[in-house]
Amino acid sequence: MNKRYVEVFNLRKSYDTPDGPLTIVEDISFSMSEGEFACLLGHSGCGKSTVLSIVAGLVEGDTGGVAVDNREVDGPGPDRAMVFQSPNLLPWLTALQNVMLGVNQVYRHVSKSVRTDLALYYLDLVGLLAHRHAMASELSQGMQQRVSIARAVALQPKLLLLDEPFGMLDSLTRMELQDVMLEVLARENIAALMVTHDVDEALLMADRVLMMTNGPRARIGADYHLPFPRPRERAAVLQHPDYYPMREQLMEFLEAPDRIAAQAAAPCA
């Protein structure tokens, strides 16, 4: 397995303000293996989404770079699909038509019937095959987000980027969609990088949790590898003997991220 399938190195991003440049994130470096699920976890405003946007190619960093499967990122591309907090569907199109938008662009070289079959396969994967002809405006928020997941995964990306994709959902729908996402990623073996501020969500879904310090000048202060086996099942994770000790570690970091990050970076005596 390629342990440097995704490489993020020395990212720094600043924005101009009336008081001069403000550095949002700096010295952001990490790598991911093929098929790995990593979470960027931290308080709101610490720069998690900025990092995700740079990896997506939507924002250009001041320094550093990103590479996916040995290709440097220089802008948006179908090798990196993104699921946002809001589904962002076209309400006047059906669920199938919304998925077909991306499929038609990426797979122009194959027949329409093959493209349609591909879109239907991923709608079925997220449990929406029976609703394929429903207008997006007629679907519930959770069903719309299922379409959004199908639309992203149908591109067969090398890296799936998730920007708090369950943040607008009620608790029950959120749990259902987390399970759907885990099943889809396991079946397709897609690497994923997710932004969240929810400790329990990170523990349930991720192989690694990259803890970010507070901004400005936020950086990755700790890198926790989770011991929970895959395929990931909610009940098994909650019953794992390391679950609550890991949860306590993450919560302690969130309570004092800069202090703990400084302790982790200090050389041993």
Image: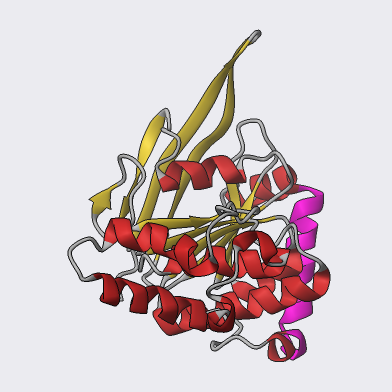
112 left or right of 269 in image: left
The colour scheme of the drawn protein is secondary structure
166 left or right of 232 in image: right
195 left or right of 51 in image: right
Q: Position of residue 205 (x, y in %)?
A: 62, 74
The overriding secondary structure of the stretch rendered in magenta is helix
Q: Position of residue 216 (x, y in %)?
A: 65, 30
Q: Residue at x 34, y 40 (%)?
A: 75
Looking at the picture, tell me which residue is in the foreground, 206 or 161.
161
Q: Position of residue 130 (x, y in %)?
A: 57, 83
Up the image or down, 234 lies above or below 144; here it is: below
Q: Residue at x 55, y 52 (%)?
A: 90
Q: Position of residue 85 (x, y in %)?
A: 65, 54
Queried whether the magenta region covers residue 259, the answer comes back as no
> Can the viewer see residue 224 in this picture?
yes
> Can the viewer see residue 269 in this picture?
no
Queried whether the magenta region covers residue 250, the answer comes back as yes
Up the image or down, 249 lies above or below 20; here it is: below
Residue 172, quarter of picture: bottom right
Rendered-image quadrant of the N terminus:
bottom left
Q: Residue at x 20, y 69 (%)?
A: 110
Q: Residue at x 75, y 57 (%)?
A: 168
Looking at the picture, tell me which residue is in the foreground, 245 or 193.
193
18 left or right of 191 in image: right
Which stretch did the figure color magenta? 238-256
The total of numbered circles placed on residues is 0
Looking at the picture, tell me which residue is in the foreground, 188 or 265.
188
